[in-house]
Amino acid sequence: MARPRTHDENLRLRLLDKAGELLSTDGPKALSLRKLAGDAGTSTTAVYSLFGSKPDLVNALYAEGFRRFGERMAATGRTDDPAEDFVRLGLTYRESALADPHLYSIMFTKAVPGFEPGPEAEELARTTLAPLMDVVRDAIDGKVFADVAPETVVISAWGLVHGLVSLELNGNLPGGFDVAASYEASLRAHANGWRR
């Protein structure tokens, strides 16, 4: 009878989530492979077996964050109204950040000094904004949005959602502030600003 595989995908994902939590709560110095293994209830051998090294672990963490984010963005359905789809993708961005706040910092900040993602992880990160680019192109081609470079609209939208989400995740919004309603209102105002 074959031995059951203990270093499986479930353990890999558990280690990635735990690594993200360590980074987001205690900073990059807290991310040691020994501490990670102990916190996850496994051995350092398992960590090395699944990731190879600390830089490989951080790269896998970065890639996992974008994999989850990309799945959510791609799963956001399309309607007949590209301006509404633009807003819906912005809402998905926030939902994704709130679902995985422990991955957000590695994805969009320099949470680990000196970390540079590998080529495959970088490519994955770039492709996650493809649904937004498609919606913006459709809005421009359909004469819903102004005739500007789609990249201008995409980057401005990214700046808006990233800024608002970062303020929320870091606890920098005033008490009693209705984050969800204000966030959606901001998205709608932004979409309306691009209309012809």
Image: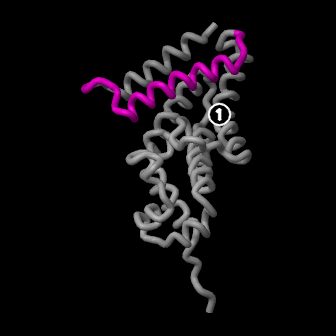
Residue annotated with mark 1: 129
Give the image quarter of residue 85.
top right
Residue 19 pos. (x, y %)? 48, 55
Q: Is residue 82 above or below residue 11?
A: above
Q: Residue at x 63, y 63 (%)?
A: 52
Q: Residue at x 61, y 30 (%)?
A: 79
At horizontal 63% and vertical 88% (from top left) the residue drawn is 2
Give the camera-side residue of 14 and 132: 14
Residue 93 drawn above or below residue 158 = below
Q: State which region is magenta.
A: 147-176
Give, as a three-letter code, the residue at label 1.
Answer: Leu
Task: Give the structural element (helix, strand or loop) at label 1.
Answer: loop
Q: Name which residue lies at 61% across and 60% down.
A: 53
Verify whether residue 166 appears in magenta.
yes
Q: Is 22 within the magenta?
A: no
Picture quadrant where residue 9 is located: bottom right
